[in-house]
Image (spheres, rainbow, N blue to C red):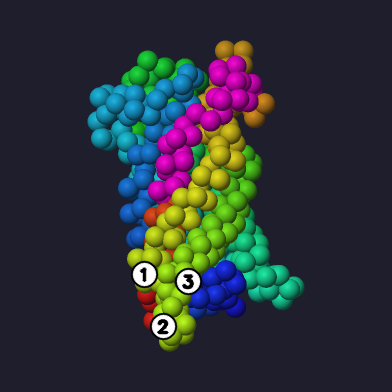
Amino acid sequence: MSLGTAEDDSASEIHIPADIDWHMLDKSKFFFLGAALFSGVSGALYPIVVLKTRQQVSPTPISSFKMSFAIMRHEGCRGFYRGFGTSLMGTIPARALYMTALEVTKSNVGTVTVRLGYSDTTATAIANAAAGLSSAMAAQLVWTPIDVVSQRLMVQSCSKSGKNTLSRVTSYRYNNGLDAFRKIVYSDGLRGLYRGFGISILTYAPSNAVWWASYSVAYRLIWGGFGCYMGKKDHENRLVNGSSFKPDSRATVAVQGLSAAMASGVSALITMPLDTIKTRLQVLDGDENGQRRPLTIAQTVRNLVKEGGFGACYRGLGPRWASMAMSATTMITTYEFLKRLSTKTQDGFP
């Protein structure tokens, strides 16, 4: 089943590019090219992730500009890529799990919802939401340990990068990702690598579900509006020869990018507090009878409220929104391009 081939009445004269289902893909090409393409995307956006993470664990508000200046002044460009090697090594298997769960769920749920009599638009939204939920849960099995290690590497030089000394950041000093992995397992056991796993699921699963559902709705609405506009513009031409508008690859990429940015805004606003709590759980320690202990969710929330009320939960919203928007825009356009590159036949290639 291809959910993208059917069109709404509002866009009856515009040919929305057909979706590519899981069974249509050459899996080896899909995973190999996906690893290469998404590694490049991760490298380009990693500095924003570092900036967001440091803002989230800061005990007092600090602007993105000041944080960036402090990192550049005290650590240089290298400071924006702390933990990148670890993150990159984890991205490849995590992305493989994510893409597999995403496509399999989307294809199967989409087929079921259409058979149940839902409209194509509703079926697409439901299938995308379910796919986002399942893919996030599968990927967190790999992403959570990678997050814990890479985020510790990101923030361990915070005390040098500004006036805000993070006294609650773990006291261990890490030479690299492997050293961090070894020390975390030594001090906290394997459980330490999955610190914040529950809150990660609570953050990323609904975030992905909201994002993919919002994206599918925005994608349809934009094409619908575009179809109405083109319908008025080319009304006489269609009456004469019955032609309809077929978007080229540039129009398709533009609509995909705009839909992704809109979906990112919705998702970031809804899930930002959970992301801030998750980051602090993974990075900061509490002090109990002179000994450092992992913080609980309740302690983390209490500390945030003390530091700045509910607004403290939205520290780093700007970088996260920017990161999500840029990441989602490049991800979705790269992802759709990857799917067209990986089709068993090249009929669907733009």
Q: Nearer the viewer, residue 311 or 75?
A: 311
Pointer 2 residue: 347
- Left or right: 51 with respect to 132? left
- Residue 302 part of the magenta-drawn span: yes
Mark 1: few/some/many CA within 10 Å (<14, 14-19, 20+): few
Q: Amino acid at mark 3?
A: Gly
C-alpha separation, residue under disc 1 versus residue under disc 3: 19 Å
Q: Position of residue 95 (x, y in %)?
A: 47, 57
Give SS at disc 3.
Answer: helix
Q: Amino acid at mark 1?
A: Ser
Dominant SS type (magenta): helix
Q: Nearer the viewer, residue 344 or 242?
A: 242
The quadrant of the rendering that contains the C terminus is: bottom left
Name the residue: 37% across, 15% down. 163
Residue 187: tell me if it is visible.
no
Residue 133: tell me if it is visible.
yes
- Left or right: 279 with respect to 347? right
Question: Quadrant location of residue 118?
Answer: bottom right
Mark 2: few/some/many CA within 10 Å (<14, 14-19, 20+): few
Which contiguous range is marked in magenta?
A: 299-327
Q: Amino acid at mark 2?
A: Asp
Q: Residue furthest right?
A: 116
Give SS at disc 2.
Answer: helix
Pointer 3 residue: 231
Q: Which mark is residue 249?
A: 1
C-alpha separation, residue under disc 3 versus residue under disc 2: 27 Å
Give the vertical position of 283 relative to 329 (above or below).
Answer: above
Give SS at disc 1.
Answer: helix
Q: Position of residue 106 (x, y in %)?
A: 60, 66
Q: Nearer the viewer, residue 149 or 102?
A: 102
Question: Quadrant location of residue 74?
Answer: top left
Name the residue: 53% across, 65% down. 224
